[in-house]
Image (cartoon, rainbow, N blue to C red):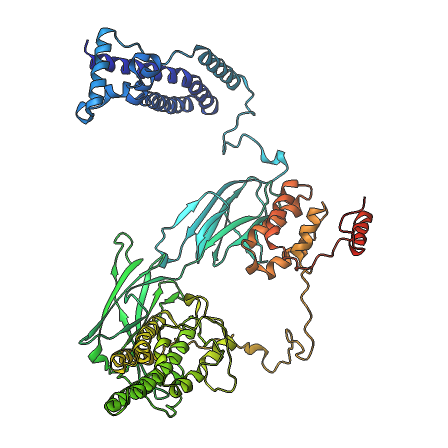
Amino acid sequence: MTVDARLHEIGRNARTRSAAIASLYALPAAAVVVAIGARAAGWPGAMAAVVVAAVALGICMRRAARAVDEAWIARRLDDAEPRFDDSADLLFRDASTLSPLQRLQRARLHARIESEPAAEVASPWPWPRIALAWVIGIAAVAFVALAPGTVIEVPGSGSQDPADTGATRIDRVRLDIAAPAYTRIAARSESTLETRVAEGSRVAWHLHFTNMPNAVALAFHDGSRVDLARTGDEWTGERVFATSALYRIVPDGAPALDDDNLRRIDVTADRAPDVRVIQPGKSLTLLEDGQKTWDLAFEASDDYGIAAASLAITLAQGTGENIAFKEQTLALAGDDIDTANPGRHQRYRHQLDLAALGIARGDDVIVRLAVSDNRDPRPNTTKSASFILRWPPDASSDSAGIEGLVEKALPAYFRSQRQIIIDTENLLAEQAKLGDDVVLARSDGIGVDQKILRLRYGQFLGEESETRSDGAPPGDDNRKGKNEADAGRADALTKREAEHKHYLDAQKFGDAGAVVSEYGHTHDVAEAATLLDPETKAILKSALNEMWDAELHLRQGRPAEALPFENKALAYIKQVQQSSRIYLARVGLELPAVDESRRLSGDRKGLTDRAAALAPADDTDSAALAAWQALDAHGTPDLDALDRWVDTHAGATADSLALLAASDRLRRAPACEECRHQLRSLLWPLLPQPATTVEARVAPDASGRAYLDALRGGNAGPPR
């Protein structure tokens, strides 16, 4: 016999043995099922039980046989015979997928099996356990056969008289649930008194009682009731649920229910649509040269379906106080992304024609998407953030006068870079007529002005300020630089002031250093500065770099080489000055509706005296805290006060219905320890946080006082 044939035989024997053992375990249980079916329904029940038992027995045997796979056989071979070197799994693998070393080991195993056949690996017969299972099965069959007829009862057989129990039972329950049409949820029926439904669903009860009552009602936790109507031997009623609710079944004219606990209907609220912006990728986009259109792309999803989507377009034109707005709204049609659920996940694309919109230089186009779902009668609406397309205006010229009431991005004294350029150009025009010492002195003076401007920018960006070692304010550097004309001024180029301190010149109007030192502390870490947005800070940092290079050449007396860097710094400043307008979505004031029924009635209910002093809040005035303390002390809490507190603080609790249900359970079973523990656990997250107080110092004892007295007396060591 070949090696593969021997392995196949070993596996077949192991599977047969495993299936036989499973059948011997299952046969007693099958006999008990057949006996119960025969006792309950005679021969028809016995035949049905035989079919069910046979199917179950076949499934058990099949699963037991399939559990013996090649991996199982390999593990048993490795455990049974050490000569397989824990490599028996190589016998069941394709030789073409093995490495050369694995193929060599597989050949060695084949040679060993051919020389001495492998042993059987089938599971041994567990005769003691099989015998125990058969003994228990025979005893169970005898009990079913010999037990009195009242012991075995099939639900719905009516063999037990419910009147003998002294309580009314609900032996048949059906809840018909019809969700709103817009949800497209199919109607369903459930055989339970508790369920979860969609918002706005209609729930219809169909109840059958063992003792027929005269009337039945559903009492809800909010005080409302639904009276059920009798149809034959069944009681029916219905209600539409907008929020979750607790209810109790109250029969009249019959014994109380054996289980009259509160039942719960959970309502799943209709969520608002979720909007995601795909294009543009940032909130502010600058119009590029030659751009004629603006591409927009959005995605929206909803739990039940999207009804409509609209794009609000606002064109802002003008500057300062003369800004005019033109608004229009476009309806968008979306494409389904999830074809299996049409209308629930859609993508919207639109291309704005800027020429048709009438955009001009200096204008802004603001777009905002609004998506509504198909909720009835009032849909949920979600609006996206506003996105701006800006056509930057022409660079504005410097002016020393007031430029109206338009607020600029930077203070006015940041525009002195233009004056530095003018002074440098004048120096270059007169350089041929001046001596070298005069040119160096004037160039150094302009460099000092450049330094002052750079330091002011640096403070707004989070850099440290710099002062001279003599403590003079930076404004004095300009006068000293213009008066000193000695050749040693060139050495000031490589000297950086090392002293760092804040200064505030209260007499100098508009000093940036004074403003920052007075109201901010932004110089330690550049990223900690919060006066400017990240894009503006990046542009101003570039301006600082150009100012450094301009100052370098000015302090060396080379104004011609400094002029290009001065112009670059001015260009960066102009880029920041163009950001003079931002767009904020207008938010209307939403006041509560006026109660017309109280007009001219003189009803002052709910009004308070405005002149009365405010009373401080009392954290201990909480029914939740009082109930928790009573439960903690094994006392009786005021459950009525707790229920009223829960009704008025429904928004402060994560699950107010669970709290009301736990309170009702404890009210009906005051001695139930499990009910007390459940209520305490629900009250714990609602307890008010105690106020923070300073703990009083513990008074020292006799040895402590002696130690303190010794310290005051000059003795450093403790008393003996």
Residue shown at the point (78%, 52%) measured from the top left: 715
Write down the quadrant of residue 675 in the picture: top right
Relative image position of residue 164 (x, y in whole percent): 62, 33
Q: Quadrant of the N terminus?
A: top left
Residue shown at the point (59%, 45%) measured from the top left: 261
Q: Is residue 43 above or below residue 429?
A: above
In the picture, measured across the screen, residue 407 lies left or right of residue 89, that is: right
Given residues 492 and 274, the one toward you in this image is 492
Q: Is residue 276 above or below residue 478?
A: above
Relative image position of residue 33 (x, y in whole percent): 44, 22
**Which residue ends up furthest to the top in the rendered image?**
116
Q: Quadrant of the C terminus?
A: top right
- Residue 422 can be seen, yes or no: yes
In the picture, measured across the screen, residue 509 lies left or right of residue 567, that is: right
Write down the quadrant of residue 306 in the picture: bottom left
Residue shown at the point (59%, 42%) measured from the top left: 259
Q: Is residue 197 above or below residue 560?
A: above
Relative image position of residue 155 (x, y in whole percent): 50, 33
Q: Is residue 713 above or below residue 147?
A: below
